[in-house]
Amino acid sequence: MLKTKLIHPDIIRVLAAAGHGAQVLITDGHYPASTKTPADVRKIYLSISPGLVAVTDLLQVLADTIEIEAAYVMAPEAGPMPEIFEDFARILPESVELNKLGRFEFYDRVVKNEDLCLVLVSGDTRKYANILVTIGVCEHE
């Protein structure tokens, strides 16, 4: 049996094959994953129902499973930052900043991303609940 909380076989398979610098996109339920991600990247739709599964749930399981060295978020052009960014900051390692990108800049970064290995589509209905994380190096003893 696995000791990790992550038990989804397809997600484990992709993460096990990924290396340092590979990236994982976790999207909200509004993100156009069928058109704003590379066609050949593995997409796993976990959007069971609005609100299920939350982006923060997926991010927490990833953070418990892999080292995360960088994070990019889709941010509004003006106004206050979305509350979910505080949740992201709580989950991510203290050394990881949220790199804020505008909507179309975020889409471009994802679509043209040769390092993207996995897209997890959630049922989260919060706006701007999209995060692109970079896998870091895991130090084994």
Image (cartoon, rainbow, N blue to C red):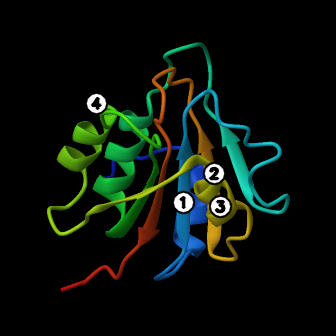
Lower sequence index among marks 2 and 4? 4
Lower sequence index among marks 1 and 2? 1
Does residue 102 appear anywhere in the picture? yes
**Residue topped by disc 3:** 110
Lower sequence index among marks 1 and 3? 1
Instruction: Judge whether 123 appears above or below 112 on screen.
Output: above
Query: Are there few (<14), some (14-19), or many (20+) residues within 10 Å of tag 1?
Result: many
- Per the image, label 2 sits on a secondary structure element best described as strand
Which tag is nearer the camera, tag 1 or tag 4? 4
Lower sequence index among marks 3 and 4? 4
| Residue sitting at x 29%, y 44% | 88
**Residue topped by disc 1:** 24
**Residue topped by disc 2:** 119
Answer whether labels 1 and 2 touch (C-beta < 8 Å).
Answer: yes
Instruction: Judge whether 51 appears above or below 95 on screen.
Output: above
In the picture, measured across the screen, residue 10 lies left or right of residue 73, that is right
Amino acid type assigned to the residue bearing label 4 in the image = Glu
The C terminus is located in which quarter?
A: bottom left
Q: Which mark is residue 83?
A: 4
Amino acid type assigned to the residue bearing label 2 in the image = Val
Which tag is nearer the camera, tag 2 or tag 4? 4
| Residue sitting at x 73%, y 62% | 111
- Per the image, label 3 sits on a secondary structure element best described as helix
Lower sequence index among marks 2 and 3? 3
Label 1, label 4: how far apart the Cα atoms are:
21 Å
Amino acid type assigned to the residue bearing label 3 in the image = Val
Lower sequence index among marks 1 and 4? 1
In the picture, measured across the screen, residue 11 lies left or right of residue 73, that is right
Label 2, label 3: how far apart the Cα atoms are:
10 Å
Answer whether labels 1 and 4 touch (C-beta < 8 Å).
Answer: no
Does residue 5 appear anywhere in the picture? no
Label 3, label 4: how far apart the Cα atoms are:
23 Å
